[in-house]
Image (cartoon, grey):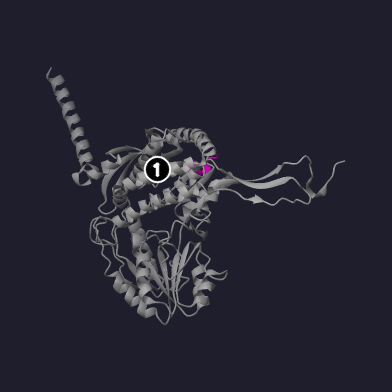
Amino acid sequence: LWRVISNVHSRLLAHRAVSVRQAAAMSSLLISQPKYSWLKELGLSEDNHGVYNGTWGGSGEVVTSYCPANNEPIARVRQATMAEYEETIQKSREAWKVWAEVSRANAPKRGEIVRQIGDALRKKIKVLGSLVSLEMGKIYVEGVGEVQEYVDVCDYAVGLSRMIGGPILPSESKFRPGHALIEQWNPVGLVGIITAFNFPVAVYGWNNAIALICGNVCLWKGAPTTPLTSVAVTKIVAEVLEQNNLPGAICSMTCGGADIGTAMAKDERVDLLSFTGSTHVGKMVAMMVQERFGRQLLELGGNNAIIVFEDADLNLVVPSAVFASVGTAGQRCTTTRRLMLHESVHDTVVERVAKAYKQVRIGDPWDPSTLYGPLHTKQAVEQYLAAIEKAKQQGGTLICGGKVMDRAGNYVEPTIITGLPHDASIVQTETFVPILYVLKFKTEDEAFAWNNEVKQGLSSSIFTKDMGRVFRWLGPKGSDCGIVNVNIPTSGAEIGGAFGGEKHTGGGRESGSDSWKQYMRRSTCTINYSKDLPLAQGIKFE
């Protein structure tokens, strides 16, 4: 009897110990602390489903999201299994049949849904921006600004939904009288969207809003390190769809890692795959999509340069260089990584930029006075240190920064390095950290050539008052980038223009201008409304 009692008592103690450990683990999550109770306004909890296809689920690996500012756990998300991915694909394809019919029968209806999505985001803009800041690490004002980009592109897409159309082309009336030639644009179907950690809301928004008004459905896989943002955004969008009695699978989501991303790239049911990320991974994605002759939209890296000529207004140059190189802790694809200075202004600009660097307010991303937050991961800190060491080995001189900061989180000092040749391997390599390489040039031809010699071709900018030089820069022998600026930084693109770059940046275009064409397929249609049948090339069958 005593043995039985002893065994029962031992099991009770063991169960209590497990419960205590579980309670301790839960209480250690930021979402469980009163300071972060606002996270629950977004429908988040300690444990969250990472799959949405009209219903919420997720039975795969459990991942914990960490705050880069202190490396403390925020909450957990259960990712998708391959079986759940398959189920989601099937539901998305079925949902497209409904959405395509809505679009065909009442074209502005799709714009109305996107308008409602924009309004729903407006209502949660501050709390969602706070989540972006908490989970990604960018400062609060940038987090809110990123959600605002999604709102803005929704507004843009609403108008676009009433304007998409193809031209009526002149037919060869001499040979084919009574014929009309038109272009018809139709949705591609299912758009897969894989986004990166640095813009966990905006990049999805650019794709989602435009894809929807074109008549497509979307399947989103966000970055594995920002899953809470993916869940929160999807909850907002899903609520709009449900209120309009539309299938939730019109905007599906599967949280996951490389297995889900690979499946999307290889899946012939994904009619267009939009991928935002590194050039290295983007190349692998491109090869998988191309192997099945699929469509792809790639937004990859950028080794961006600002070129400062002898006639530049330095009062514009200094804040531009600092903002573009330090903003988001150097983790924008449009971050300035190379600062090319004419030899006559080199020393002056270096001195002024270095002075400004030392005045950048580093701290808690949620503090309104903070201008510079942490790197996203510990791995990024390691990449920062490795790049600085390589730069020193290749002849670089450290002007300021270069150290990991002695505080909680993934903080590093914004860094300026001079003295490297323009073709040094470290200068030619995009490192996604706040390191600015300063180069000295003599002539315009030299500066333009250096701008174009890197593998990527995303963003570029010159500072000058010479209008002839401006138009040479914009012309065929000027910048080879997708974004070519004058007297403004390399970052801060507007949604009304097409966003994207050339060469190893991938060639894709998102957001404004005619980027919508990438989300649609074009048919050239010839209609014979006569009673005759003239054949091509004047051929006659008697």
The amino acid type of the residue labelled 1 equals Gln
- Would residue 528 be found to the left or right of residue 189 on screen? right
Q: Residue at x 45, y 46 (%)?
A: 208
**Chief SS of the magenta region:** helix
Q: Position of residue 125 (x, y in %)?
A: 32, 49
Magenta-tinted stretch: 262-268
The answer to whether residue 139 is visible is no
- The residue at which mark 1 appears reads as 116
Which of 511/419 is in front? 511
Q: Residue at x 32, y 65 (%)?
A: 414
Q: Quadrant of residue 492?
A: bottom left
Q: Residue at x 33, y 52 (%)?
A: 136
The answer to whether residue 151 is visible is yes
Q: Position of residue 178 (x, y in %)?
A: 74, 45
Quadrant of the snapshot with the C terminus: top right
Q: Position of residue 126 (x, y in %)?
A: 29, 50
- Would residue 351 be found to the left or right of residue 182 on screen? left
